[in-house]
Image: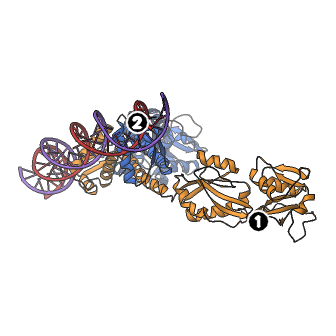
Chain colours: A orange, B blue, C purple, D red
Amino acid sequence: MLTLDQARAFVAVAEELHFGRAAARLHMTQPPLSRQIQKLEKTLGVTLLLREPRGVSLTAAGKAFRDECHQLLELADRAPRRAQLIASGQVGLIRLGYTAASGFSVLGAVLARIKEAVPGVAVELHEMVTSHQLEGLRNGAIDVGLARPPFDLEDVDSAPLLTEPLVVAVPAGHRFAGRGAPVSAEELRHESMIMYSPDQAEYFSELVAGLVEVRADQVTHTAAQILTLVALVGSGHGTALVPRSTQYLGMPGVRMLPLLESPPDAVQLHAVWLSTSTNPALHRALPMLREPVDAGPPMQ
Amino acid sequence: MLTLDQARAFVAVAEELHFGRAAARLHMTQPPLSRQIQKLEKTLGVTLLLREPRGVSLTAAGKAFRDECHQLLELADRAPRRAQLIASGQVGLIRLGYTAASGFSVLGAVLARIKEAVPGVAVELHEMVTSHQLEGLRNGAIDVGLARPPFDLEDVDSAPLLTEPLVVAVPAGHRFAGRGAPVSAEELRHESMIMYSPDQAEYFSELVAGLVEVRADQVTHTAAQILTLVALVGSGHGTALVPRSTQYLGMPGVRMLPLLESPPDAVQLHAVWLSTSTNPALHRALPMLREPVDAGPPMQ
DNA sequence: CCTCGATATGCCCCGAAGGTATCAACCTTT
DNA sequence: AAAGGTTGATACCTTCGGGGCATATCGAGG
């Protein structure tokens, strides 16, 4: 069986072409080196070296074996260093889940921060809704998520990344579109409304219900994703309440107006991760995720 | 320092995720295996495994290290086998020198024979004249040559590959061109002759001199390579004596006629190699080179 | 023929790795 | 809640193999 010590010994002899010098390079004496090479040749059943009175020369098999051994030694040298780099979080992989809407607000800033803090780390992007993100955290499919509260699971840590008000999204031709003043909940009582699906988008559905009173006969559509709502507004199907950062989506034919009743922190987006995560790259990136970001335009 | 035993131990544990089963796979008991892994982690300064009551799981560094170790072990496994294959001559490299003219006669057949006898062996082709081939053999630049006698060096073995007569090459429009009967030396006394360079093509120069008497005023050109002579004949500059296999060159505008005085073994091409060569692939190919071949058309 | 340079061999010692027995922690089960 | 089972860690012993020192052997060159 080949050992790394044998490989090192053989490479030294193959390069020095002299047992004495090779032994010195290996910090040992010549006799045990000779024995090592003999043993190696015996186990291989191959003559690697031609011992001549004037020194040593390599057979064809010896030349090839020297190169293979060299490769082997480099790999054996690299493997521990790679493990150390990964363990220290300097290289590695962070699998990040994000909601479709966050892709148009904080995702770009988050990626930029991670890139700056741990340049050697790759980020794998997975678009998924909040509930799937929490499930993904638990079963190890993702390391961190950009999601909406609440996070009732234990072992899940979170930090708010972005807090923003809800705004009123109206079609471009709407009577509110041109005015500068905020819209009040009262004024929405006579509007056609596009609402969030109560079961697939529980967070937004309850958020809206807490701010404005909407009668069932006002509701023209319900949808699960913010993108869908804004698209419906853009095609004139009604009015919707959306997070302010949705403006960066740049949906044509949609105007955003402040909602009088919305506190500035009505909508929250958090970074979430398992407190028990052992991903070293994540731990180096965490400080970047604990500080709020400003919403920005979508990534290119 | 990482050892292959440690790598094997770690891969076993990383794949089984259980010290007991891993130990069984390694044909050892569990305690020394635990120690090995501990020692490995200590020397790396990295936690590779998470010991949990229900067994073992891998850290990010552990996963990467497992893959590196796997690679390492495969290489360590492959290296000895490669050396054995090369030593047995089943794979390897034969560097073959050949004269330009032999490229149009025996080279194709020689390559085919080698390919058949030792399919795993690569053949590196080097076109070079006889004197360079002999020099190349001595300094190790080539393993075997296809060359013309004499080979006066010691340690050089040779075997005749092809013996053939000299023929008369005339331009297509020449008065000899159409006739079937051999041309005699006497008839060449009034021809313009293209001759071999006495110093660069000593073998052919003396060969021709021994067969026909050529006056200095007949000689229109001298050249070192057969190809050059035939090209000059083709463009109407005169008549030349060339080995019969030159016909496979297919030079346009040239006709070949037997030379009455040429014995059938006037020209010889030999395989030459160092009797001291240690190239195993060459030794497996040698039986193929000891038997004469028929000249054939050039390789495609 | 002798000497010198270079590798091989004999003999001893030490360290590292494996085996057996046992411990400690944790989970399950009754 | 206590007992038993599972799983990895520790203690102690033995053995095997590698390395060092001294020396033999072999071929080349003066």
- Tell me the residue at 47%/54% (across/down): B222
For the residues beneath circles 2 and 1, the answer to whether they share a chain is: no
Q: Quadrant of the C terminus of chain B?
A: top right
User: Which element is circle 2 on?
Assistant: helix
Q: Position of residue C4 (x, y in %)?
A: 14, 57
Q: Position of residue D21 (x, y in %)?
A: 14, 53
Q: Chain of mark 2?
A: B
Quadrant in which residue A283 is drawn = bottom right
Please give left or right for residue A238 compared with residue A76 in the image: right
In this figure, which residue is indicated by the disc labeled 2?
B20
Q: Position of residue C8 (x, y in %)?
A: 20, 43
- Tell me the residue at 58%/42% (across/down): B175
Q: Nearer the viewer, residue A61 or B280?
A: A61
Please give left or right for residue A26 compared with residue B267 in the image: left
For the residues labelled 2 and 1, the Cα–Cα distance comes to 60 Å
* Disc 1 residue crowd, few under 14, some 14–19, many 20+, Cα 10 Å: few
Q: Chain of mark 1?
A: A
Q: Nearer the viewer, residue B69 or B173?
A: B69
Q: Position of residue A261 (x, y in %)?
A: 81, 65
Q: Nearer the viewer, residue A27 or B160?
A: A27
In this figure, which residue is indicated by the disc labeled 1?
A263
Quadrant in which residue A290 is drawn = bottom right
Q: Which mark's residue is nearer the viewer, 2 or 1?
A: 1
- Tell me the residue at 54%/51% (across/down): B232
Indicate which disc residue A22 carries. Answer: none
User: Which element is circle 1 on?
Assistant: loop
